[in-house]
Amino acid sequence: MQYSEKVMDHFMNPRNMGTIENASGVGEVGNPQCGDIMRIYLDVDDNQIIKDVKFKTFGCGSAIATSSMATEMIKGKTIKEALELTNKAVAEALDGLPPVKMHCSVLAEQAVKAALIDYAQKNNIVIPELEGYEFDDAHDHGDEEE
Amino acid sequence: MQYSEKVMDHFMNPRNMGTIENASGVGEVGNPQCGDIMRIYLDVDDNQIIKDVKFKTFGCGSAIATSSMATEMIKGKTIKEALELTNKAVAEALDGLPPVKMHCSVLAEQAVKAALIDYAQKNNIVIPELEGYEFDDAHDHGDEEE
Amino acid sequence: MEKSKRIYMDYSATTPAKQEVVDEMLPYFTEGFGNASSIYSYGKEAKQALDQARERVAALIGADPQEVYFTAGGSESDNWALEGAAFKNRKKGNHIITSKIEHHAILHTLEYLEKTHGFEVTYLDVDQDGKISLEDLENAIKDETILITIMFVNNEIGTIEPIKEIAEIAKKHKILFHTDAVQALGNVEINVKDLGIDMMSMSSHKIYGPKGVGALYIRKGVMIDNLIHGGAQERKKRAGTENIPGIVGFGKAAELARVNFKEHVEKLTRLRDKLIDGIEKAIPYTKINGHRTDRHPGNANFAFKYIEGEGMLLLLDHLGISGSSGSACTSGSLDPSHVLLAIGLEHEIAHGSLRLTIGDFTTEEDVDYVIENLPKIVQRLRDMSPLYESAKASGEVK
Amino acid sequence: MEKSKRIYMDYSATTPAKQEVVDEMLPYFTEGFGNASSIYSYGKEAKQALDQARERVAALIGADPQEVYFTAGGSESDNWALEGAAFKNRKKGNHIITSKIEHHAILHTLEYLEKTHGFEVTYLDVDQDGKISLEDLENAIKDETILITIMFVNNEIGTIEPIKEIAEIAKKHKILFHTDAVQALGNVEINVKDLGIDMMSMSSHKIYGPKGVGALYIRKGVMIDNLIHGGAQERKKRAGTENIPGIVGFGKAAELARVNFKEHVEKLTRLRDKLIDGIEKAIPYTKINGHRTDRHPGNANFAFKYIEGEGMLLLLDHLGISGSSGSACTSGSLDPSHVLLAIGLEHEIAHGSLRLTIGDFTTEEDVDYVIENLPKIVQRLRDMSPLYESAKASGEVK
Ligand SMILES: Cc1ncc(COP(=O)(O)O)c(C=O)c1O
Ligand SMILES: Cc1ncc(COP(=O)(O)O)c(C=O)c1O
């Protein structure tokens, strides 16, 4: 298993690591049993622009790197734009992930969505794209790896 | 599998190799199927002393070496003495044989006996020690060798 | 990256071959390369080298040379012992007893015997230190039991099992006893006769020998089926042209292990204890895994709460330190190490495990360097961890 | 003894590792020794070396690298292919087809599958040149047939089997086809895709690589059971810490074999033909075994009437020449080689067989030396032989 330089960079120097007090929305996905938890904090302004975003992650190198990249990709964006963030986009922005680690990017996408759902609930907003959103078990580690 | 120096010496420089015309007795044991044949020629004088002995052998290095050693051990001896030649004695005289090759020494002993039987028959002599002598299949190559 | 410093602390995974070992192997690649089974001079040299290596390995474990059969490694030895004993004794019974903390070379072989060949396996629990219970073992024995296989020293947590006692129980019930001694070899005293072992697996690359070579000790009189069928090598028990250079290297490594045994164990034990004590003092919320004293002299195994092992390994690697972890992420499976779960660790703590195993080339300075740097790494990851944050919020962590 | 001259003519038994091969292996013993499956830098180097070696072996046989699985040698590869395919397909059927001239790694594995696991095996006859009949093969196929295994090149007499045609028949009947290509590798053109091979066994030490390494080609899509169970190495198909130096050496040897292929085959063929012709002319009552043209480029196999092989080998060895024989005495069994009997040789003639196999380090002078000396050796043994004497007496020999 080998990480790209981008992954290593985001793991060694994670962007947006930390917490936001009184965040507009907080999302947490994963569970400690499986070895990954991502928690994302959003600070959304009145124009639905994500002014700030922070994360805390328990998990492997790629879990931390995808959290870092995902937060960077939505920072300063509108909620609409953030909704469009896909796990593939995160993985690509990191120059790819080893197949066994793709679930980390799924987790990152889900953590963003979970934070947005929390934001919507707190603010009584309906985000149609997130109605009935399901958090699949992202843990399809595959079976053929080394 | 490793041969002693004595075996190698008798193989490289076999004593008494050849034939005797009008031999007093000729004995042959073994069969080509199994890969060993020994033929021994005796020249026995009126005092029952083995004046000369020769061999021809088809077989492996130790078959040739045991033939050579056996002929040397009975040359100049009386028939009585030759009858006492055992396969163990031949093997010991060669500083031992690998376990899988012990049958060659058995063959050498049998070849001498066969030649003596032939001599007895040709000369109408009864050699009590050889009455009913059985040539077992000497080919017990064993099962545990390398 | 600060890669100039390189501190290898994964000796239980594999060791470098010692220079003396390589030196002794070299002539057999290009010159003394003959087939040991052939008759001509080239072959005789090979045969002599083979004999000497066999004597050296035998001497390390108190066996007769004819009881040592060379294989391609620990995994093959394990597979051979289990399948060989199982198929040979199938008519007597189909039940095998093992423990939950065996190496995968044991567990997956037994799984295969269960699924594909109809054998039945009992997996014994271990206590929180990783030891099996002799009482459990006695209770697990049935009329159909044909084999007991319990490892000598566990590869993750270093715990030493009560081999002599297990062998006695096996003997009492006339059941074959195999032990995977891959981690034990060279690191704990082994005398197969005194211990009453019927079969024992060994691997060269764990004792500073080359990779791809191992051995199976089979006590005289014990009959098992072959695993690799073919030519008449290894007294007709293991086919394949003999890997002479590899076997010579293993022999040399065994010789060195025997001669340096006392020194080796003393040094490792001292450094290991220093490492364990140092880390335990420096890093709170840490559990030491494995038995404190009945333990591989070079094995240190920690579980750091609130963090995951892979990140730790990456940050350690960045500082030039190599270790390993029982976390799921590093193994590529969903679950953390079965060994850590078997000693009762919860999943989330098991994910934060770190195994550091030291060896003959480890220095006092290496240990100091790790004690100095590991706490920073753990803290850095804890600062990123939502679990740590929650623990602080709840007061669990101060 | 005149041992200064050393003429090795047993390349089919094993080859010396080439210096370039050893040079490329060396760093992986003491430095790049890491566990290829681990995460840290030591491990990454090992992993890269492993990948390169896999590509090189794949390139030699026209396979994808992911279709190449490293093993500990040709015997393990054979055992794995046969047992793996047999147990995996047991529900479909229990019948396997092979030939009478396979290597023992095939024959003894099949015997084991017959005796211990209830499989049924058909052993095809071969003609006087050692070729199987495609018609016989077709006729042997039953509904229960799950595997055909026919060797690519025979190790004793060098005959090349009609692999492409066999593969077509197997495909037509949807039966797996395995070939033991241990002698073919590097010596005959192999493209597994063009030939339609499902599984193929290889061994490093026959192509100037180190001993104790081999590979099994498994075509993508072909599923077989594992032989060595345990860790997740080789994409979970073959457990055991990777023998990195060995694999690197095999890779380098494969690379050299690919690059030098044409040259190698031309040189060997020329020297072999010179040797065969020279001996045939110089020694009467001699039979050349194996197919005259569809033959391993380095293989010469003679049967000299009236004499036995071991003595020949000893006398040759005395002159520094290494060869091998299919006689019973050299194998330690009662019967001469099963291959020689299968091509119709009588026991007594088979006992007088001599295999001389040449390779990359054989020179023209070596061949001359053998042509000069072998006739004397044969004559010397004939002069000792009672069979020769009888043949003279009967007029069979003049
Ligand atoms: C045709 C054939 N198959 C299999 C083998 C076994 O290979 P190895 O000795 O590498 O196990 C050999 C060589 O001994 C061989 O010639
Ligand atoms: C306890 C134990 N058994 C078996 C093995 C397998 O040994 P090898 O990698 O030599 O096949 C190992 C090491 O990986 C081990 O630690």
Image: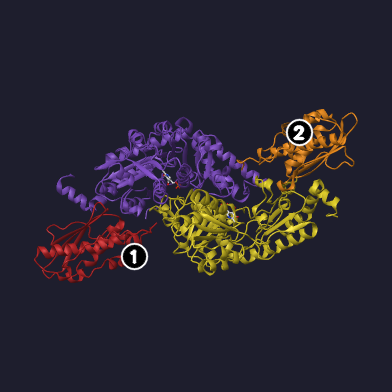
Chain colours: A orange, B red, C yellow, D purple
Circle 1 is placed at which residue position?
B96
Q: Between marks 2 and 1, how big is the CA–CA gap?
A: 89 Å
Q: Secondary structure at mark 1?
A: loop
Question: Looking at the picture, how far across and down is residue C148, in whole percent?
Answer: 53, 61
Identify which amino acid the numbered label 1 is placed on.
Gly
Where residue C297 sits: x, y (%)? Answer: 66, 62
Element at label 2: loop
Question: Residue A146, located in which quarter of the rendered image?
Answer: top right
Q: Is residue A141 above or below residue A82?
A: below
Q: Is mark 2 within 8 Å of ligand 2?
A: no
Residue at x 51%, y 41% (from the top left corner): D253
Whether residue A5 is visible here, answered yes or no, is no
Q: Work out whether residue C274 can be spotted.
A: yes
Q: Residues within 10 Å of mark 2 (few under 14, many from 20)?
A: few
Q: Please identify, in this view, whether the residue under mark 2 or under mark 1 is nearer the observer.
A: 2
Name the residue beneath numbered marker 2: A132
The quarter of the image that holds ligand 2 is bottom right
Residue A123 screen position, x and y as percent:
88, 34
Residue C371, quarter of the rendered image: bottom right
Amino acid type, residue under disc 2 in the picture: Gly
Mark 2 in CB contact with mark 1 (< 8 angstroms): no
- Chain of the residue under the numbered disc 2 shown in the image: A
Q: Nearer the viewer, residue D333 or A137?
A: A137
| Quadrant of the frame with the N terminus of chain B | bottom left
Q: Is residue C274 left or right of residue C16?
A: right
Q: Is residue D163 left or right of residue B128?
A: right
